Image: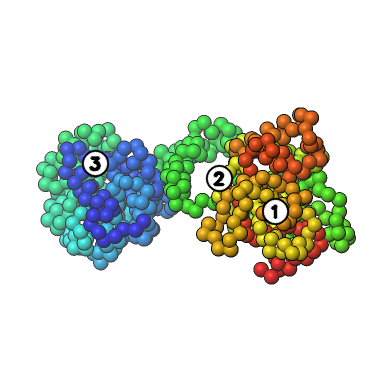
């Protein structure tokens, strides 16, 4: 997270707010933490601050709390906690990571990172955790007072709280030594005194407090004398109560028990009800917030709500393509310069967010899925319409559906245009064929007549206009037709329902056409005749179909030259 030098920025306000809260009627209660998650949990539980504990940070790194980690490690951990929570961070900075030069460098790093308070202790560098028996060497009073002065000198803004931690009781020098040092550190400018003790009772700390007489704000770390309540400490003039390591110890216990149970049971079933569900994990990560932000700021892929059906069964007898290639290669598996048509379709569809793609065919499932993330649906037999509807029946009613012919190659930009459509049934159409009207190479284009007819103006302000389809057929004349149908139909969820309902109705009745042999054109025309509105969406190039050997050659050449 960026922190500016602006004193009014959120991060700086944390220091100011913490300083003010120390003056309140109630002590601030801080919970020890070592990472973003522990800091967040402290906030959710209702603590007033996070103690960025050297003990916890070291333990989580698997090393002794003995200045094995560097200042950078501690600062990184404090930053992570600070970014994860709105709570102020009180950073345990051991002895200041060296002498007063190190303290100056340290204070600059912590202050500009938005840490609300730093705490340094009057032991010698390298220290060991205060609860470890043996070597607990104290700095001289004047050396440590110098560090406090250095810290106050280094801070740029008045808000950062500098805490002087007394280790006299830890090192066995008694309350008098603690009071003498507290006086010196207070005079040196410390904003707060932390009186630490490893005694089994609160006695020595309470004695210190009685003599200190609230000369400055005071913090306590009642790890070994846990009976006193926050209220007890308040009545003794304490402003900050630090529960330094209880989260870490709770986690260790829970993890050890869970691990043992899993190994003993040979499965994780017995622990499932005792551990946090993954939904809680995602909540802690901030995933719900991220999803909201994603909706606002992430480029929405146009096809993320679209499912695609590629009907590829019931195709016509081998044409010249198969004859010239010497084998009847199924159209989706036709190799176009190193990738099959199906692979190329799947790539284009995936690139605009279409995640569920189904090929309805009589090909073995492995042959289909070898072409990418595409699901194989077995064709029921029969013609193209039956193949399409076998795919449609597999999809949920809330999805938008794209029906895409299996012999098409297309740019993803074509899909982007089509997916903008708000119609229930939209045909992708192109009128480029009119440019070659004098000499159409193909005998039977799928041609479309619309109402109104598109304007023949060369210049048009609107890039794409929506027209209503009046007729669609291979037998319309090139001259009277307005568009060519590209072989893609987009159905809204309502459009899908209209399709399914129409198909069932026509299949069940003695209708003019036989659903077993009718083409998609026939079906669309029947819907139109029954009063259903079918719209166009226009593209200008960006696609080609591979019907015959000429198409195949053109496709290879064009793909190759891209
Ligand atoms: C820490 O939490 O790292 C502390 C407090 O410094 S204590 O472990 O009690 O020394
Ligand atoms: Mg510590």
Q: Position of residue 448 (x, y in %)?
A: 69, 50
- Residue 48 locus on image (x, y percent): 28, 41
Query: What whole-number distance in Å separates the C-alpha atoms at marks 1 and 3?
Result: 80 Å
Indicate if the residue with disc 3 has its beta carbon within 8 Å of ligand 1: no
Tags 1 and 3 in contact by the CB under 8 Å rule?
no
**Any atom of ligand 1 within 8 Å of the CB at mark 1?**
no
- Name the residue that disc number 2 marks: 422
User: Which mark identifies residue 28?
Assistant: 3
Q: Which mark is residue 481?
A: 1
Q: Is residue 171 above or below residue 155?
A: above
Badge 2, how many Cα within 10 Å: few under 14, some, many 20+? some
Task: Identify the element where label 3 is drawn.
Answer: strand
Q: Residue at x 64, y 38 (%)?
A: 532
What numbered label is drawn on residue 317?
none
Answer yes or no: is residue 173 visible.
no
Residue 209 at x, y = what percent?
15, 42
Above or below residue 436? Residue 397 is above
Relative placement, left or right, of 156 versus 59 is: left
């Amino acid at each position: 997270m960026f922190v500016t030098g602006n004193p009014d920025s959120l991060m700086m306000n944390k220091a100011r707010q913490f300083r003010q809260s120390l003056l309140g009627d109630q002590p601030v209660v801080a919970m020890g933490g070592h990472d973003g998650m522990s800091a967040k949990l402290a906030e959710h539980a209702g603590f007033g601050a996070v103690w960025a504990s050297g003990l916890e940070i070291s333990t989580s790194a698997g090393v002794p709390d003995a200045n094995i980690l560097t200042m950078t490690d501690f600062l990184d951990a404090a930053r992570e906690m600070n970014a994860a929570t709105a709570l102020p961070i009180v950073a345990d900075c051991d002895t200041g990571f060296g002498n007063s030069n190190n303290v100056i460098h340290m204070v600059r790093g912590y202050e500009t990172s938005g840490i609300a308070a730093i705490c340094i202790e009057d032991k010698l560098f390298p220290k060991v955790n205060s609860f470890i028996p043996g070597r607990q060497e104290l700095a001289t009073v004047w050396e440590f007072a110098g560090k406090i002065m250095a810290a106050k000198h280094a801070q740029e803004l008045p808000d950062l709280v500098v805490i002087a931690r007394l280790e006299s009781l830890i090192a066995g020098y008694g309350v008098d030594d603690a009071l003498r040092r507290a006086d010196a550190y207070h005079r040196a400018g410390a904003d707060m005194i932390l009186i630490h003790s490893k005694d089994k009772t609160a006695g020595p700390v309470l004695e210190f407090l009685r003599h200190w007489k609230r000369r400055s704000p005071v913090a306590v770390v009642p790890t070994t004398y846990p009976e006193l309540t926050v209220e007890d400490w308040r009545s003794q003039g304490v402003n900050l109560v630090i529960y330094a390591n209880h989260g870490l110890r709770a986690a260790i216990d829970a993890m050890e028990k869970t691990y043992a149970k899993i190994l003993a049971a040979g499965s994780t079933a017995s622990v499932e009800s005792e551990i946090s569900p993954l939904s809680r994990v995602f909540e802690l990560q901030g995933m719900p917030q991220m999803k909201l932000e994603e909706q606002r700021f992430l480029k929405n892929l146009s096809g993320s709500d679209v499912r695609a059906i590629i009907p590829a069964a019931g195709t016509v007898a081998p044409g010249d393509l198969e004859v010239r290639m010497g084998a009847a290669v199924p159209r989706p598996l036709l190799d176009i310069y190193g990738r099959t048509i199906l692979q190329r379709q799947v790539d284009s569809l995936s690139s605009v967010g279409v995640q569920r793609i189904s090929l309805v065919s009589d090909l073995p499932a492995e042959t289909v899925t070898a072409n990418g993330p595409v699901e194989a649906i077995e064709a029921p037999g029969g013609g193209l319409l039956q193949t399409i509807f076998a795919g449609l029946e597999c999809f949920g009613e809330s999805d938008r559906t794209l029906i895409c012919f299996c012999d098409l190659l297309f740019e993803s930009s074509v899909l982007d245009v089509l997916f903008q459509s708000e119609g229930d049934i939209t045909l992708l159409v192109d009128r480029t064929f009119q440019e070659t009207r004098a000499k159409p190479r193909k005998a039977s284009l799928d041609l479309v007549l619309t109402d109104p007819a598109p304007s023949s103006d060369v210049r048009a302000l609107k890039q794409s206009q929506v027209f209503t389809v009046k007729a669609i057929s291979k037998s319309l004349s090139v001259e009277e037709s307005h568009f060519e149908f590209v072989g893609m139909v987009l159905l809204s969820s309502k459009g899908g329902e209209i399709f399914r309902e129409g198909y069932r109705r026509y299949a069940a009745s003695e209708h003019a056409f036989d659903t077993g042999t009718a083409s998609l054109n026939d079906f669309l025309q029947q819907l139109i005749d029954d009063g259903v509105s079918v719209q166009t969406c226009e593209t200008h190039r960006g696609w080609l179909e591979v019907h015959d050997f000429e198409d195949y050659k053109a496709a290879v050449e064009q793909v190759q030259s891209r």
